[in-house]
């Protein structure tokens, strides 16, 4: 079997992972030959051209350093102040500074240059996420003809939002240099198709112009999942139970409503707290009987919009405390810290309600992990945003419009009052969906399409000629 090379901005670390990506891919690579390539996390004045290899928890990881200026333009700038907000349809929060594109491009070229000498002819390359859209183009410029796949972990934007991104045409041409582009949900493929069928209808004089040729790129939805069996086991380990005991001591009989999210404006945290406030305001019976725990590890906190989200949330949590807390009862706890998987699994299992209400999200693995961690005899209820990719998977969740805080408050009430029979029935179908869409099936189906054998079936020779033409 050919080696698998995974490329992503962040490589797997040793501490608790805030995002789902590292958790998801660790398992895939542990089962095949190959290595993981990415940024070391270090900023230096003059990075070495060659990557350094290291073994991290049984994985072979090759890393490069970046300069501070390039990293700023590539990561905080183009990736997270332009691509992230635009792809999440938050153009109001984007900072359009076109010059960041140069740093973004430079870092992608640096990745390609350091990766090129490490590659063999039949290696399969799997690139992850919006930081690295141009990587295939850069590698193909260096003469690489290997199979290359790209997986977008975040939603694909609407056409207007895409056109707001500087250099969007180049980025879309870069996307067409991959053999396979995987998206989280059907809605993302539909948005992509809408764009690729029409493409920059900007000419005043003629019919719509199709400037990017996607005929050799397969674009399809491959919804990511978790490892539900592992989470189910983890949720009853001593480490998880320790967290459950701690919480039970603090909460007594109160029902727990739990949110776990990176502190990001796409997660809808202020709307969530507002919905909780409405729940308490409209349903006095829940006061002293429920508790909201929001775990929100800080993220990208050099970016102003993230700092503002954090400040907003501080103020809103303070407001709800001031309005409802009593000397011996607090309505909520807000923790700005990352927890390891065992503690989270324990919290998920304890929570009567898993509150997952992003305004827009690629998939949302917290929804998967919450479902997987439930006690089958007494499961909790998933309240889920219909704008998360997970909404296509989890039809039996209580789905809400996260912008409508009345609706979310009502869903919370229904979840808290839901009889055991209904909770069990809903959970069984959610768990079946989590099992069907597990991480192994995700990787196997993507890599099955990306394998050289799949290419031969589709007539790889014709494709090679096209690559040569595009390199020239
Ligand atoms: C999302 C992205 C990932 C990213 C993670 C954490 O899940 O899709 O690519 O790694 O957030 O964000 P950070 O900026 O800290 O890497």
Image (cartoon, grey):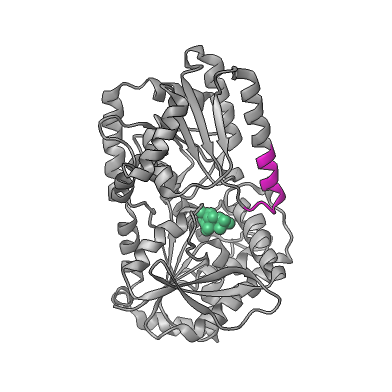
Up/down of 171 relative to 229, above or below: below
Q: Position of residue 271 (x, y in %)?
A: 58, 32
Up/down of 227 relative to 179, above or below: above
Q: Judge whether residue 305 is colored magenta.
A: yes
Q: Position of residue 36 (x, y in %)?
A: 45, 71
Q: What residue is at 30 percent from the left and 73 percent from the top?
A: 454
Up/down of 311 relative to 199, above or below: above
Q: What residue is at 35 percent from the left and 37 percent from the top?
A: 395
In the image, 203: left or right of 417? Answer: right
Q: Position of residue 190 (x, y in %)?
A: 46, 52
Q: Judge whether residue 46 is colored magenta.
A: no
Name the residue nearer the viewer: 369 or 425: 369
Name the residue nearer the viewer: 452 or 312: 312
Q: Does the magenta stretch mainly form a helix, a strand or a loop?
A: helix
Q: Position of residue 417 (x, y in %)?
A: 38, 20
Residue 194 in view, yes or no: no
- Give the quadrant of residue 6: bottom left
Q: Quadrant of ligand 1?
A: bottom right
- Give the quadrant of residue 183: bottom left
Per the rendered image, the range of residues in magenta is 300-311
In the image, 221: left or right of 441? Answer: right
What quarter of the picture does the N terminus occupy? bottom left
């Amino acid at each position: 079997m050919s080696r698998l090379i995974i490329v992503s901005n962040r490589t797997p670390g040793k501490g608790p992972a805030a995002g789902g990506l590292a958790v998801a891919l660790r398992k895939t690579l542990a089962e095949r030959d190959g290595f993981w390539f990415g940024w070391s996390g270090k900023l230096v004045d003059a990075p070495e051209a060659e990557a350094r290899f290291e073994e991290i928890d049984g994985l072979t990881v090759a890393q490069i350093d970046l300069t501070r200026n390039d990293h700023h333009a590539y990561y905080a700038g183009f990736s997270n102040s332009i691509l992230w907000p635009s792809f999440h349809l938050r153009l109001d929060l984007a900072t359009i500074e076109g010059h960041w594109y140069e740093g973004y491009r430079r870092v992608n070229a640096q990745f390609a240059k350091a990766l090129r000498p490490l590659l063999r002819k039949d290696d399969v390359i799997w690139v992850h996420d919006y930081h690295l859209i141009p990587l295939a183009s850069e590698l193909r410029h260096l003469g690489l003809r290997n199979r290359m796949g790209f997986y977008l972990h975040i939603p694909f934007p609407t056409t207007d939002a895409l056109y707001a991104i500087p250099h969007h045409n180049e980025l879309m041409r870069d996307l067409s240099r991959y053999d396979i582009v995987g998206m989280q949900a059907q809605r993302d493929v539909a948005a992509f198709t809408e764009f690729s069928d029409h493409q920059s209808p900007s000419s005043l004089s003629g019919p719509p112009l199709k400037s990017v040729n996607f005929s050799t790129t397969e674009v399809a939805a491959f919804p990511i999942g978790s490892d539900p069996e592992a989470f189910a086991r983890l949720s009853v380990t001593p480490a998880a139970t320790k967290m459950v005991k701690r919480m039970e001591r603090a909460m007594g009989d109160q029902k727990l409503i739990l949110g776990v999210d990176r502190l990001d404006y796409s997660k809808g945290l202020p709307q969530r707290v507002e919905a909780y406030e409405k729940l308490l305001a409209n349903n006095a019976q829940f006061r002293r009987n429920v508790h909201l725990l929001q775990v929100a590890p800080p993220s990208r906190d050099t970016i102003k919009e993230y700092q503002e989200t954090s400040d907003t949330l501080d103020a809103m949590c303070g407001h709800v405390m001031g309005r409802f807390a009593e000397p011996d009862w607090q309505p909520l706890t807000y923790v700005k810290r990352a927890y390891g998987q065992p503690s989270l699994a324990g919290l998920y299992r304890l929570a009567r309600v898993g509150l997952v209400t992003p305004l827009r999200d690629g998939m949302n693995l917290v929804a998967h992990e919450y479902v997987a961690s439930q006690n089958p005899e007494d499961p909790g209820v998933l309240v889920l945003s219909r704008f998360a990719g997970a909404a296509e998977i989890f039809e039996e969740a209580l789905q809400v419009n996260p912008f409508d805080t009345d609706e979310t408050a009502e869903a919370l009430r229904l979840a808290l009052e839901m009889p055991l029979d209904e909770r069990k029935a809903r959970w069984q179908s959610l768990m079946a969906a989590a099992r069907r869409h597990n991480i192994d099936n995700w990787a196997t189906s993507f890599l099955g399409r990306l394998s050289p054998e799949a290419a031969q079936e589709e007539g790889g020779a014709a494709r090679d000629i096209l690559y040569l033409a595009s390199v020239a």
